[in-house]
Amino acid sequence: MATLTFTVDSALLAELGEKLVESAHVALVELVKNSYDADATKVTVRFTPQSRGGPDIEVSDNGFGMTFEEVQQYWMRIATTHKLKKNISKKYGRPRTGSKGIGRFSCRRLGEKLHLTSTASLGNRRIQRTEVIFNWNDFVPGTEITTIECEGQTEILSTGKTGTTLRISGSQVDEWGRRGYGFLKRQFAILVANRGIKRRGFEADPGFNLSLEAPNFHERIENLRDRLLSAGWGDIAIEVDDKGNAACSLRAMRIGTKAVKYPHKVPMLAGVRAKIGIMLADRSEMRDRRTISKGNLGTILNEWGGVFIKYKGFRVFPYGEPNTDWLDIERDRAVRRTALPNILQPFAAKLRGVNPGRALLSLLSEKNYIGDVEIDERARGFEMKASREGFIGEIGITPLRDLVRFSIDWATMYREFYKSLVAKEESDRARDELALQLRRAVSSSEVVTAAVRAVESEVKSFANQLATAERQQVLRSVRTATEAIEKHEESSQEELRHLRLVASTSTLLLIFSHEVKSLLTWLEEVSITLNRVGRTVPKKESERLAGIEKEFTSVKQRFLDLLAMTSLLSVKSPEAKIEKLALKPRVEKAAACFNLIKRTYDIEIDTESVSPTLQVGPISEAELYAVLLNVLSNAIKSVIAKGGARRVAVSAERDGRVSNIHIRDSGLGIPDSHYEDVFAPFVADPNKRLYRALKTKLNPEDEYIVGTGSGLGLSIVKEILSYRGGEVRFVPPKGRWRADLEISIP
């Protein structure tokens, strides 16, 4: 009986390399996965653009490489079952990512020529280097694969490092678009998420990383893992210097870059560094969707989420492993801890929309914090166990935990702030959509009313199609609901107005406190004088007594004036009248509050250009004073800091239905790049000049009368004016003036 055997035509390589591998991007990912399976810890991928066709590509790794025999048995054998039999890598026990034995033919998809160089250990300090050149054009359809020879050579070396390099050239078609390149990075990100793990029976896996050079996409990434950690909502960096001073920084969506110094010195943590990504599998909270995707990030967080510890470059187990919770994150989430630690309460209190007592409700799962804490030889209190798993005792771990957790809680506080910003933006978008529907502008103070009217109109239109009884029932229900909404909104707006006024009392109360101290000083002098008069009672002393009494009366009047102004912001302030107010007497009264500081520092406040007949409003008197006191306080601080001739001028003029008030000063000025920044809450001194200069020129006892720089003043001014239909802005100053604040108010 005759027997038959299969033969293999070279056309099979085209089927494997070009049909099963659907794109160049997938082909290159398969090659990098081979490096991962070879226990590489670092891979470099380089693109070299060519004048025609696609780029040349080089993939170089530091894995265990292949001997000449392995190249012949595995690389040169189609559809080998090698990876099925050994489905974990030999050194670190990594689950192998390939199994079909066709990944190498991905090279055919990427170019016509492949130059393979692989270096592997033979034991006894011998290194074997093997080179093979594959010219895929030699494998033409109609020829037997086994008859095609590939040039190769091998040599034994006494020194060298293991690894494999693939150089691919001769691509006739350029498949590398921006979208495909993004896919490539996202696939690589899953691999570089491996930051180290210990598998039973294998050496500790130190992790995997990749660098990428792609000049055709104007990109060079030295460390893709760092890029991964910076791709989510935010990332934290921690650094401790040799003296134990710890600095934390945060870069995050809508937040920008923030920095804080850890309040405690930690000399035993000298040299500690950390980078921690704050990552959520939510597209709306990703800064770089070209590096990660929602699906990829879900895989990454599930496998590699957690904060790891590295000691002298090596991963320390079990820190960061599932269920270890060394940072007590899951513990606090389980008991629904809400309040920030006391150490962070002052920071949180400065952020609008952040409740220090509830901010920790935004604390994410431990898996959402992904990164490494690196400890070097400068740190003390870290003694490894004999098993090299964990440290003996908690001498160093306790302060390290406190520092890292401080940084995470601090970032959580800003995440809560971010959520309040997003909520406001969504509210603004809804208002814009409502205005578009109504075909007219809708101010923030009338959103609810306008929305209710729009709903009423739509319901009435619908109800007209109903029977009489049903229509009346629907309209009654709508009327009841809309009245409840409007009453609630009215109450909320009054409460909000009251809160704005309460928030603005700081300047008044500080002035009040300062003046009380001044009054007490005068009382003491009066007492001394009266004692003298009681002993001597000469005629001349009577005249002096009269002078003192006159001064006493003046101070007393100032005290009464201030008391009258603070009463405007009392608990009854929500009942204050909203009316048109004469501007000039209020400006003069506000300026008079600073008389003591004006005399001490020779400051001129000119109000002559405010017409006595000019009225503004409707606005409450308390709101107007809150605006005037805050802007005058800022101008006074600026002229004191600048020195020289200290001048402030207030002018006002009517322009149709709007009054334009200008507060100009000869102080430090403000760059136009910061014109908008200064109105954000808690931005007190964006160019870092004002308070530095004030420290040298302002008497310590006087800082309270002009405020200590909470960064709230101008944001309160903007809120009050916006609510009353007005605006505030900085405009370029003219002539001798260095700053010009313009207030427009009906």
Image (cartoon, rainbow, N blue to C red):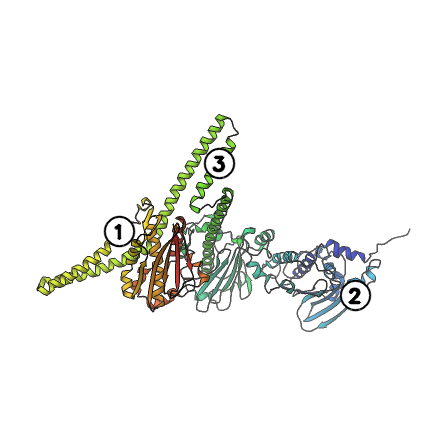
Lower sequence index among marks 3 and 2: 2
The answer to whether residue 534 is left or right of residue 628 is: left
Label 3–label 2 contact, CB within 8 A: no
Which residue is more in the foreground, 357 or 471? 471
Which residue is most to the front? Answer: 656
Q: Nearer the viewer, mark 3 or mark 2?
A: 3
Q: CA distance from mark 3 to mark 2?
A: 81 Å
Which mark, residue 16?
Answer: none
**CA gap, disc 2 and disc 1:** 98 Å
Q: Are marks 2 and 1 in contact (CB under 8 Å)?
A: no
Q: Which residue is mark 1?
A: 564
For disc 3, the marked residue is: 457
For the residue labelled by badge 1, is the local secondary structure a helix, a strand or a loop?
A: helix
Residue drawn at the location 27% of the way across and 62% of the way down: 596
- Point out residue 433 in the picture as x, y percentages from the top left corner: 51, 45
Q: Amino acid at mark 3?
A: Ser
- State the separation of the CA atoms marked 1 and 3: 47 Å
Of marks 2 and 1, the one in the foreground: 1
**Disc 2 designates what residue?**
150
Q: Is residue 259 left or right of residue 523?
A: right
Give the mark nearer the N terminus: 2 vs 1: 2
The amino acid type of the residue labelled 1 equals: Ala
Asked if residue 396 can be seen in this view, the reply is: no
Q: Give whichever of discs 1 and 3 has the lower sequence position.
A: 3
